[in-house]
Image (tube, rainbow, N blue to C red):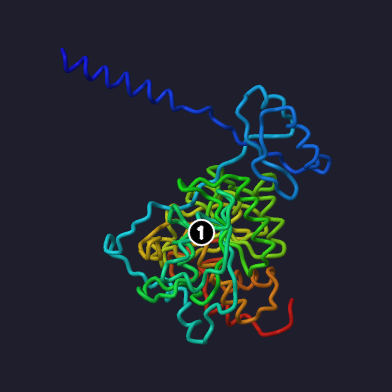
Amino acid sequence: MKKIISILLILLLFSVSTVGKVAKAELRLIADPKEDTSIEKLQEEIKNTDCEINKKLSDTISITCKNKKDIKKLKNFREEKKYMLIKDVPIQDKKAKVKDIWDNEFIKATEVWELGITGKNRTIALLDTGIDYNHIELKSSYLYGYDFVNDDDDPMDDYGHGTHIAGIITSDGINDEFSKGIAPDANIIMAKVCDQDGTCWESDILAGLEWASKQKPDAISLSFGTMETWVSKNCIKEPLARAVNKVARKIPVVVAAGNFPFGVSSPACASNVIAVGSSSYDTLMDFSARGYPMRNHGVIAPGEDVYSTFPGNNYGFMSGTSVSAPYVAGLIALAKEKNNRLSGTRIKRTIFRSANKELSPTYSERSEWEIGYGQIDALKTIENIRKSRRR
């Protein structure tokens, strides 16, 4: 009996202390940009509320509110979206899986290196969880960045995903040759837009996208998306897709297509981007996104047990279209080294034209809704690029 009473007392004390620590939940809201709604007008709308500005963007603002009564007063705001990293569970022990890790050889990046093309003087912007810029394989490539989650200039990776993505593009392969990136001499700038839990808030992404586009990189790579998917058409009205499409008119934007075989997530469904699905040599991964956006503007790249860097000078594997996208971003770095006058549109068309649909009977049986233009081919892409005037 005494034991039961003791347990009840402990539970009671725990529940009381827990309740005492519960804070009032904040709701994040954002206003969709409209021609007749200026930032000044939005600021005026929240003037007599308890809401505070969280992010001020070029054409809108995001806010945080605690009072539900205040939220009901707001006509131009909606709940802010969360985006998720498109990945499988990472494995940080390099002996944990037996895996042939010659992906760069398979897509013929190693043959491009033999031509002396390694991404020199080219820059890729990543929007992700940050980067371990002290990693031995990455510190020579990292230029600078910004943390849009905590609003400071230190985009250190507190989750691990961004460091892995960066390594797929530009790991030097110093301590571990198998970690070598597709464009090992390319530079990286990082916009940390996802927090320590891997949550990527819409306003942080939009702020990071605005910042990245102003840096004028050779490409921007995104490896997050929505649970909602698009099967029979591109997405037009989805807010982030609209913003990404605008940037992609001038700078190539590469986006993970999603790990749902019943549609393509946003912003990969935006018509101006390069959507990237996942392969494992001559096999399309079961989880790889399928749908009209793949047929319209998609390719596939390695996405199973991809070996790369993790924070703290560690290495490991990760699967998903999340790790496929940086292969295409790195390929753009190689292409821009071959001819730095190429427009984004020209590069995209060359990658599509050079992709391989007939690597094996497995691929030839697949439709364009599944594999898009096909598996990327780094060597063929470079061969199809001429050192000529911008087109």
Towards the viewer: 102 or 188: 188
Q: Residue furthest right?
A: 36
The x and y percentages for residue 158 are: 45, 53
Mark 1, residues whose alpha carbon is within 10 Å: few (<14), some, or many (≥20)?
Answer: many
Q: Nearer the viewer, residue 136 or 271?
A: 136
The quarter of the picture where the C terminus appears is bottom right
Whether residue 35 is visible here, answered yes or no, is yes
> Is residue 369 in view?
no
Q: Secondary structure at mark 1?
A: strand
> For mark 1, what is the residue?
277
Q: Residue at x 26, y 17 (%)?
A: 8
Eyeballing the image, is 124 above or below 64?
below
Amino acid type of the residue tagged 1 in the rendering: Gly
Going by the image, does 121 lie left or right of 107?
right
Q: Quadrant of the N terminus?
A: top left
Residue 139 location in percent, x, y? 47, 70
Q: Give the number of marks.
A: 1
Up-down relation of residue 320 to residue 342 (above or below): above
- Side (left or right) of 328 relative to 45: left
